[in-house]
């Protein structure tokens, strides 16, 4: 089967279950999805990005609502329009993950990555949700694929920067991955000074381009709101949630009595919470640091947000028993994927080379510990992936830079939610990259399939 034929088959494999879920499970949007839908309807109606009050709005990033608005303009704001759009984007995500993995390993393993992404239950279920995470994941993968395809050329850096800039409008944290795009300039070269200089230049171009893509929206915020905001006005809010006296490590609703009682605008409110959040951290840094394991645990130990969303939207269908089953299936699938992905950075163990046995044995013990401990601390496995990538960075950036990019994206996720707060939906943005890592478990051919078909 040629790569083109496999791409067609993979597209069908990814699309069919997503379309079923999009049509059979979608209901009126709830939670954050309710606000994304309102923003999209207002944009589609020509009112601009305004919230429930009718005024200029930027609490949530505009990117997903803008994408939904385009679909609403074409097909109308029907119940199934957003979910079907999600299904199409999820299908594209599986294809691009396959294509990106071809730049690292053999065709067979790249196909495994594509199939894993296509059939991963959590990504399929998200088709019914009006949530940003799969679209943000698509941006991360697409930017990396462009960078890998053009390998550090000016065109590649510019296009990758544009893609990541658009992804930043969906998820502002995506901008943190811009420097890693420059490493694709090293994918087929040595770590010479010239190569490192080329990679630095590529990273700078991609980063600057991404910022330029976001700049018009930032200027819009400065003009129509009560102050300037890069993309959205929830950074201070999120910092305070992860630091205030009632913080548990996950989302909790802030009240005016917590510190910001008198505010006149969204930007002022966000800056107030930012200021108070840093005050709480400085006041008791030890308590704030003690919450980091809990934050990472809420982010990476399980996968349940999508089921909770469906249960809230359709309580009659999603009974407590069905929700319990759904959470179990999604959580253990996520844990299994994360565990196998950890071995994607290890060489194949061999008795002839005893030094290759110890990493596999130690990592296996860590996975066993996470699986058998009652609270299932799989966030430790995620940390291990980042540590392994840091230890092997020299070989990865020259022979498997996409794997390093995946670990870099995971590291940015860990850092962000260690500072703010954790929820399991946030790890969805790196799930396709985990599928890539899992397909590369214990090495495999280092002759990339993409190189064989150029």
Image: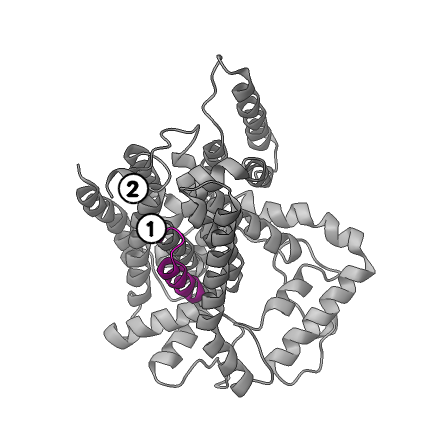
Please state the horizontal and vertical placement of residue 401, each as a whole percent of the image: 45, 43
441 with respect to 356 (left or right): left
Q: Which residue is mark 1?
A: 149
Q: What residue is rendered at 69% in x and 69% in y?
A: 274
292 with respect to 432 (left or right): right
Q: What residue is rendered at 49% in x and 43% in y?
A: 404
Res 450 label: 2
When the figure is inspected, residue 15 is found, relative to residue 215, above or below; the finding is above
Pointer 1 and pointer 2: residues touching (CB < 8 Å)?
A: yes
Depth check: give the residue in front, 363 or 52: 363
Q: What residue occupies the far top of the structure in this picture? A: 352
Query: What's drawn in magenta, residue-wise?
Result: 150-166
How busy is the neighbourhood of tag 2: few (under 14 within 10 Å), some, or many (20 plus)? Answer: many
Please state the horizontal and vertical placement of residue 193, each as a whole percent of the image: 53, 47
Q: What residue is rendered at 61% in x and 67% in y?
A: 235
Residue 29 showing in the rendered view: yes
136 with respect to 88 (left or right): right
- Which quadrant would the N terminus be assigned to in this image? top left
Residue 329 showing in the rendered view: no
State the scheme by which the image is colored.
one colour
């Amino acid at each position: 089967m040629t790569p083109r034929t496999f791409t067609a088959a993979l597209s069908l494999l990814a699309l069919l279950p997503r379309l079923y879920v999009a049509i059979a499970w979608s209901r009126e949007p709830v939670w954050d999805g309710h606000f994304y839908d309102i923003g999209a309807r207002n944009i589609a109606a020509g009112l601009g990005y305004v919230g429930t009050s009718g005024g200029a709005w930027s609490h949530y990033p505009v990117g997903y609502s803008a994408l939904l608005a385009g679909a609403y303009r074409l097909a109308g704001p029907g119940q199934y329009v957003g979910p079907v759009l999600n299904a199409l984007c999820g299908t594209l995500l599986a294809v691009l993950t396959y294509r990106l993995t071809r730049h690292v390993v053999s065709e067979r393993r790249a196909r495994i990555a594509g199939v894993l992404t296509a059939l991963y239950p959590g990504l399929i279920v998200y088709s019914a949700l009006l949530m940003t995470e799969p679209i943000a994941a698509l941006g991360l993968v697409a930017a990396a694929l462009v960078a890998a395809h053009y390998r550090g050329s000016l065109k590649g850096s510019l296009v990758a920067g544009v893609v990541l800039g658009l992804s930043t409008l969906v998820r502002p944290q995506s901008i943190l991955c811009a420097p890693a795009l420059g490493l694709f300039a090293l994918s087929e070269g040595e770590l010479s000074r010239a190569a490192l200089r080329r990679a630095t230049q590529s990273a700078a171009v991609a980063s600057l381009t991404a910022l330029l893509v976001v700049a018009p929206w930032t200027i819009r915020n400065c003009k129509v709101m009560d102050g300037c905001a890069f993309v959205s006005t929830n950074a201070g809010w999120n910092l305070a949630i992860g630091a205030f006296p009632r913080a548990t490590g996950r989302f909790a609703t802030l009240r005016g009595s917590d510190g910001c009682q008198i505010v006149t605008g969204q930007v002022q409110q966000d800056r107030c919470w930012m200021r108070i959040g840093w005050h709480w951290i400085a006041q008791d840094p030890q308590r704030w640091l003690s919450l980091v394991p809990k934050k990472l645990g809420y982010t990476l130990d399980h996968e349940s947000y999508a089921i909770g969303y469906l249960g809230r939207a359709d309580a009659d269908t999603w009974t407590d028993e069905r929700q319990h089953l759904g959470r179990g299936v999604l959580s253990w699938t996520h844990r299994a994927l994360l565990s196998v992905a950890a071995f994607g950075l290890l060489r194949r163990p061999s008795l002839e080379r005893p030094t290759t046995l110890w990493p596999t044995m130690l990592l296996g013990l860590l996975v066993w510990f996470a699986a058998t401990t009652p609270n299932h601390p799989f966030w430790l496995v995620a940390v291990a992936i980042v540590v392994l990538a840091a230890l092997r960075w020299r070989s990865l950036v020259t022979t498997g830079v996409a794997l390093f990019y995946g670990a870099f994206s995971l590291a940015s996720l860990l850092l962000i939610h260690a500072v703010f707060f954790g929820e399991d939906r946030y790890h969805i943005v790196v799930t396709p990259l985990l599928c890539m890592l899992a397909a590369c478990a214990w090495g495999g051919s280092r002759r990339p399939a993409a190189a064989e078909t150029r």
